[in-house]
């Protein structure tokens, strides 16, 4: 039975909760059980925000240290804080903007999601760009594909054409970053 | 909502769904993390379904409790939800309602916050249930929380007793795939049967009601439907593990992961109070050691009268403070089972601290307050504006409404001294309504010389922009006018000002301070809507583009005193982060060297 544990972290306002939900909904769509643990409340005002996502037959919403299969870090410095959740074989996709001074191990994949989002004229779409990058880079080890996330977005924004188009675009631009 | 298949639900949404599926028609709440989404989700789902009944955000938890409880007295099913410290506010009606009992099912949902993540305390609402003598259910997951709503109504009506559901943050703010069930058509009609001996009982009758309550508890401690569950039937061993709440979810995974599923009998308590008597006797008779893991107080553990075999918070095996994270539980279980546990080093990296949003009107108010009265004592309160801490404009935060009561206490403590400090209290609009009004009336009666700044951003922002009594239901000001209320309290100085007009606001706070030194309370209402509340998104002034001139000498005044997330140091000069800047333009008034200017 499929089991995947993923940490998604960033800063309040970046949309960590949103991409956690997209992934969780994709899991349900594919017939998996899913549990998440999220940060709400005061920390959402610009503080560190972390989501735990567990796909498969789990009973606890939280990931124990050294158990995560993957880490999606919307801020580079989140890696220092949350890298300890990763298994030895775990993967990392980190938003590595040019001005980030954090040292990230060689196995990690960096995508400059801030730059891509700004170029799209949608600085708030950093979350979708990075999710797209993860889907491109980890196509073989993630429980879902970019098509699955597109379907979830369509279900969500089906009647808001502009928003849907913009989200698909952000996701795709992120997806493409791993080819360069 | 048609019954498609499983859908992703937040724990709080699952609780709301459970209320609908149980036919609950009266729902009230006061917002507070982690409970807030229960009522907002209920209202959302109700609108979509054209479901009958009454739902509302009340002025505070006590009033919310009383409204919902009266609904249950008429025979309807009712629920009130709040966070754990909200239950303190509602504890007066809670204790009494336990004696009087109920006719329609009445469920009190009190969400605890072990950690704490977003609260003043880690208190355990199950202890409040014990104090009130009502049963409490302790869900492990969103799915179980939804199921327990049905159980809660069943026992509430069977035993005619209010029932508490106590979810924690990890249940409220977990999401899970959940199958919605059908929502029954309402068949109930409100029918209040007068019975003063019960509903208006004098002490003589209260004694009798107390006796009845004890009898109900005795029956509940033997009630089969809520008895503890043996999770791993086949396991046998000399040491048992007893868990409740989210610790149960953690423990199930850990026993499997550590190969203990066959050797450590696991019991999940669904109803921590009253704990089933037969269960206690059976475990004491059967096991050499009983490890009890629960959050946050030892409620189950203390009901084991014979404790020579129990291990838990009372014996020091389980920590008494903080959230019981799964890794902590793994460590404790391994210790009990004689296994080694390799602790993962957790880096001591401080996370980012929360901060007021860029463009938040509170930031402008706090900056002005420090400018106008730099040496004052600043009492403050519960809400986003607690983060005025970062600007050095908040000295105290105690509980809802305490900014005003504490301001009075400071005044009385200093009043016979030759030199008295100025005192400035800050409180949000929603918090002022919640618990500030009686304190303000008291301050007027006692001629307390202080300034109260009511930070009126037309919303309850921190918890997700719920309405306040001043906003009514929409953007139209159909609600209660704060200035009229302040005047009605007898305050002789009450003026309103938009803090975005920085110079005028500083001057007004200065005037208020001068007035208060001679005359008693002065009130300034700082009026500017919350910048992240979608209701007000078209009401903000046009964005001002700002830049930092070459004259910036990197003195850091703006960063330290204004603390806007869009301002940071880059090399020896301040930089404005265009991705974060909200264009409020307040920083133009902040730089002492006028190096921040319009672009």
Image (tube, helix red, strand yellow):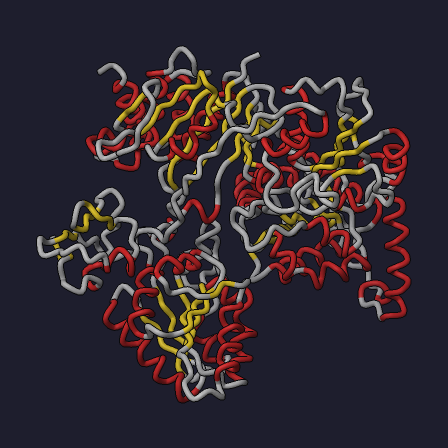
Q: With B539 as the anchor, is B209 left or right in this view?
A: right
| Residue at x 90% of width, y 36% of height | B281
Work out which residue is located at the far left of the displayed protein and give it: B550
| Residue at x 36% of width, y 80% of height | B513
The picture quadrant where one finds residue A79 is: top left
- The N terminus of chain B lies in quadrant: top right
Q: Position of residue B376 (x, y in %)?
A: 38, 74
Q: Nearer the viewer, residue B353 or B501?
A: B353
Q: Nearer the viewer, residue B279 or B515?
A: B279
| Residue at x 42% of width, y 83% of height | B420
Q: Position of residue B383 (x, y in %)?
A: 47, 57
Q: Position of residue B279 (x, y in %)?
A: 86, 35
Asked whether the viewer can see residue A170, the reply is yes
The picture quadrant where one finds residue A81 is: top left
Residue B335 position (above or below residue B50): above
| Residue at x 48% of width, y 53% of height | B466
Residue B324 position (above or below residue B60): above
Residue B410 position (above or below residue B517): above
Asked whether the viewer can see residue B54, the reply is no
Q: Position of residue B138 (x, y in %)?
A: 70, 40
The picture quadrant where one finds residue B285 is: top right
Q: Nearer the viewer, residue A83 or B584?
A: A83
Q: With A126 as the anchor, is B170 left or right in this view?
A: right
């Amino acid at each position: 039975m499929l089991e995947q544990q993923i940490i998604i972290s960033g800063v309040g306002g970046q949309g960590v909760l949103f991409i956690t939900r997209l992934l969780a909904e994709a899991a349900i769509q594919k017939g998996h059980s899913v549990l998440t643990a999220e940060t709400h409340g005061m920390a959402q005002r610009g503080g560190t925000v972390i989501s735990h996502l567990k796909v498969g037959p789990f009973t606890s919403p939280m990931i124990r240290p050294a158990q995560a299969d993957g880490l999606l870090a919307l801020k580079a410095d989140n890696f220092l804080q949350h890298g300890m959740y990763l298994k030895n074989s775990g993967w990392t996709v980190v938003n590595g903007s040019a001005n980030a001074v954090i040292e990230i191990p060689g196995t990690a994949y960096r995508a400059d999601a801030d730059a891509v989002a700004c170029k799209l004229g949608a600085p708030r779409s950093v979350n979708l760009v990075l999710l797209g990058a993860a889907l491109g880079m980890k196509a073989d080890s993630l429980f879902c594909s970019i098509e699955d996330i597109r379907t979830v977005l369509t279900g969500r924004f089906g009647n808001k054409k502009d928003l849907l188009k913009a989200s698909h675009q952000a996701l795709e631009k992120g997806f493409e970053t791993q080819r360069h | 909502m048609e019954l498609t298949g499983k859908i992703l639900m937040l724990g709080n949404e699952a609780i709301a769904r459970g209320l609908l599926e149980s036919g609950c028609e009266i729902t009230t709440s006061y917002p507070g993390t982690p409970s807030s989404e229960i009522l907002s989700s209920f209202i959302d789902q109700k609108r979509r379904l054209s479901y009958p009944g009454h739902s509302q955000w009340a002025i505070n938890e006590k009033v919310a409790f009383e409204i919902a409880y009266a609904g249950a007295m008429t025979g309807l099913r009712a629920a009130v939800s709040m966070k754990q410290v909200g239950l303190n506010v509602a504890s007066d009606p809670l204790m009494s309602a336990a004696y009087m009992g109920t006719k329609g099912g009445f469920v009190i949902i009190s969400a605890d916050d072990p950690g704490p993540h977003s609260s003043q305390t880690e208190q355990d609402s199950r202890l409040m249930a014990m104090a009130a003598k009502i049963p409490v259910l302790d869900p492990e997951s969103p799915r179980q929380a939804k199921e327990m709503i049905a159980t809660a109504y069943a026992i509430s009506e069977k035993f005619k007793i209010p029932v508490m559901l106590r979810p924690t943050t990890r249940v409220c703010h977990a999401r899970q795939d959940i199958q919605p069930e059908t929502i029954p058509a309402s068949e109930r009609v409100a029918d209040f049967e007068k019975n003063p001996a019960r509903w208006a009982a004098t002490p003589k009758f209260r004694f009798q009601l107390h006796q009845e309550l004890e009898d109900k508890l005795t029956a509940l401690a033997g009630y089969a439907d809520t008895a503890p569950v043996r999770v791993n039937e086949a396991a046998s061993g000399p040491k048992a593990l007893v868990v409740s709440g989210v610790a149960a979810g953690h423990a199930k995974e850990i026993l499997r992961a550590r190969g203990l599923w066959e050797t450590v009998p696991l019991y999940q308590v669904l109803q921590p109070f009253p704990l089933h008597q037969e269960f206690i006797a059976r475990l004491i008779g059967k096991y050499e050691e009983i490890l009890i893991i629960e959050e946050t107080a030892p409620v189950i553990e203390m009901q084991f009268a014979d404790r020579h075999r129990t291990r838990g918070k009372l014996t020091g095996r389980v920590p008494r403070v903080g959230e019981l994270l799964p890794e902590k539980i793994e460590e404790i279980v391994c210790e009990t089972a004689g296994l080694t546990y390799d602790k993962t080093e957790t880096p001591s990296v401080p996370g980012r601290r929360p901060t007021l949003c860029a463009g938040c009107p509170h930031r402008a108010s706090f900056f002005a307050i420090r400018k106008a009265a730099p040496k004052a004592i600043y009492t403050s309160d519960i809400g986003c504006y607690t983060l005025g801490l970062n600007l050095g404009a908040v000295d105290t935060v105690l509980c809802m409404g305490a900014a005003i009561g504490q301001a009075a206490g400071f005044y009385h403590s200093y009043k016979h001294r030759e030199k008295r400090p100025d005192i400035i209290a800050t409180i949000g609009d929603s918090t002022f309504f919640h618990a500030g009004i009686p304190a303000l009336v008291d301050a007027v009666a006692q001629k307390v010389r202080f300034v109260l700044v009511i930070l009126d951003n037309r919303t309850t922002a921190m918890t997700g922009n719920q309405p306040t009594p001043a906003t009514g239901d929409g953007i139209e000001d159909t609600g209660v006018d704060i200035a009229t209320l302040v005047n009605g309290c007898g305050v002789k100085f009450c003026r309103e000002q938009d803090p975005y007009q920085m110079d005028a606001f500083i001057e007004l706070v200065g005037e208020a301070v001068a007035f208060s030194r001679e005359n008693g309370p002065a009130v300034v209402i700082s009026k500017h809507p919350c910048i992240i509340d979608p209701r007000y998104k078209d009401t903000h002034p046009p964005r001002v583009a700002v830049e930092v001139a070459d004259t910036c000498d990197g003195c850091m005044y703006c960063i330290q005193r204004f603390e806007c997330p869009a301002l940071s140091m880059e090399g020896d000069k301040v930089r404005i982060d265009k991705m974060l800047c909200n264009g409020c333009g307040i920083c133009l008034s902040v730089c002492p060297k006028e190096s921040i200017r319009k672009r």
